[in-house]
Amino acid sequence: MDTAAPIVEAFRSQARTAHEMGSALVGALLERVAEDLAAGGPAAELVAGWRGHPLLDNLPLRLMGAVHREVLAGRAPALAGFFPSVGGSFEPEGAWKALRALLADEAPRLRAALEGPVQTNEVRRCCALLGGFLEVAARTGLPLGLLEIGASAGLNLRFDRYRYRLGPHAWGDPDAALALDTAWSGPPPALGAPLRVVGRAGCDLRPVRVGRAEERLRLLSFIWPDQAERLERVGRAAELAAADPPPVAAARARDWLEAALAAAPEGRATVLYHSVMWWYLPEEERRAVTALVRAAGARATTAGPLAWLRMEGTNPRETEIRLWTWPGDADRRLGRAHYHGAWVAWEPDGDDADEARDGGGSLRSRA
């Protein structure tokens, strides 16, 4: 797909999302880019001939990530004055003038950057995922072996090394180097469960190698420039992971998962999980992953159980947290959460075994 109308609408849609998610800067600039696209300006020339699905591949966030990377790297001084992430102060008209000039002057470098996928390893999503991990530990009494698809830099593979403040509840080492907090409603998760991680691995089409400075810059570039807390949190998590990076293979989810599930040993509960990435998989791959997991579930035993934990969007405002477990083939809704983990509504219900299910898919990107 390379027609103008879908691309313009993708930018307008992501602009609305950014405003809803508290980024006036990204929302305002994407609105202006959409206008420039429709008018045939520098933005239109930049994306001319771009092939792919502008919404599913999230062309708007690819572009904003590329632009932010220029600012963070010190290659866009005029625009930097309007980006709070480097000490600037946002002003829409001035920022757009500087951005439009950048789109025209640095088109080849920006165009090349559009080929890379969006990487938003939002570590505060662990506040929502933690409840699922605790539930598996409580149910099985076994240590956990983690498998994450769409793992990006693997920051969420280290979830057990963070301290959590879940509203009035707390979990984790009080002396942990990174504390995560969220507004929590509903009952507490299974905080007393004996949770221990004995294996962790993930995959991503283009993993972020946090031990490399330029790769950490790539990761931070996808965090919205006017959201300082997110930038600080992800930056700190990346620094910690650089000293002991989790294994994240460069592979498609379907290919990697087939081997990973086949090799899952007994004596642990294997937990496949993902957060706000299902939407990015092609429909055919989503079906293939679902089939692989269900087949592995059919082989699961009480000595080697399998769980599928998902934090994925079901509407434009929030994600749903679900846990599918085997033996038993039981799928439960555990609650809802903000796309960036700012709040969690813990609302565990019963099994939904009769419901038609797959891994869950976002209606719109919330990176």
Image (cartoon, helix red, strand yellow):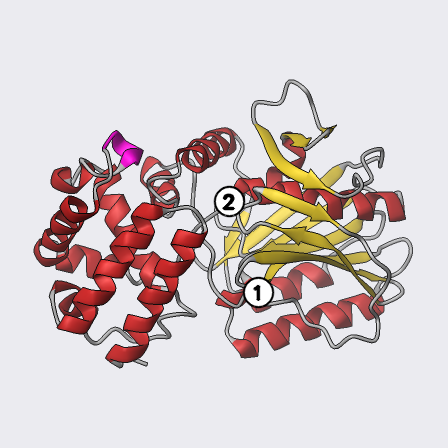
Do we see residue 310 in this rendering? no
- Which disc number belongs to residue 24? none
Q: Position of residue 263 (x, y in %)?
A: 72, 58
User: Residue 232: which quarter of the image?
Assistant: top left
Q: Nearer the viewer, residue 357 or 271?
A: 357
Instruction: Answer few, some or many: residues within 10 Å of disc 1's Cα (few below 14, many 20 plus, some between 14 and 19).
Output: few
Q: Position of residue 328 (x, y in %)?
A: 89, 65
> In the image, what residue type sits under mark 2?
Glu
Q: Which residues are magenta?
A: 84-88
The residue that appears at 34% across and 39% down in the rendered structure is 226
Horizontal relation, residue 248 to residue 127: left or right:
left
Instruction: Answer few, some or many: residues within 10 Å of disc 2's Cα (few below 14, many 20 plus, some between 14 and 19).
Output: many
What secondary structure characterizes most of the magenta part? helix
Q: Position of residue 9 (x, y in %)?
A: 33, 72
The residue that appears at 52% across and 53% down in the rendered structure is 249
- Which disc number belongs to residue 122? 2
Quadrant showing the N terminus: bottom left
Q: Nearer the viewer, residue 17 or 271?
A: 17
Q: Is residue 299 magenta?
A: no
Horizontal relation, residue 2 to residue 14: left or right:
left
Q: Which residue is mark 1?
A: 315
The residue that appears at 64% across and 18% down in the rendered structure is 175
The residue that appears at 46% across and 61% down in the rendered structure is 365
- SS class of the residue under badge 2? loop
CA distance for labels 1 and 2? 19 Å
Q: Nearer the viewer, residue 325 or 45?
A: 45
Horizontal relation, residue 358 to residue 105: left or right:
right
Relative to 191, does residue 219 appear above or below in the rendering?
A: below
- SS class of the residue under badge 1? strand
Relative to 337, does residue 290 appear above or below in the rendering?
A: below
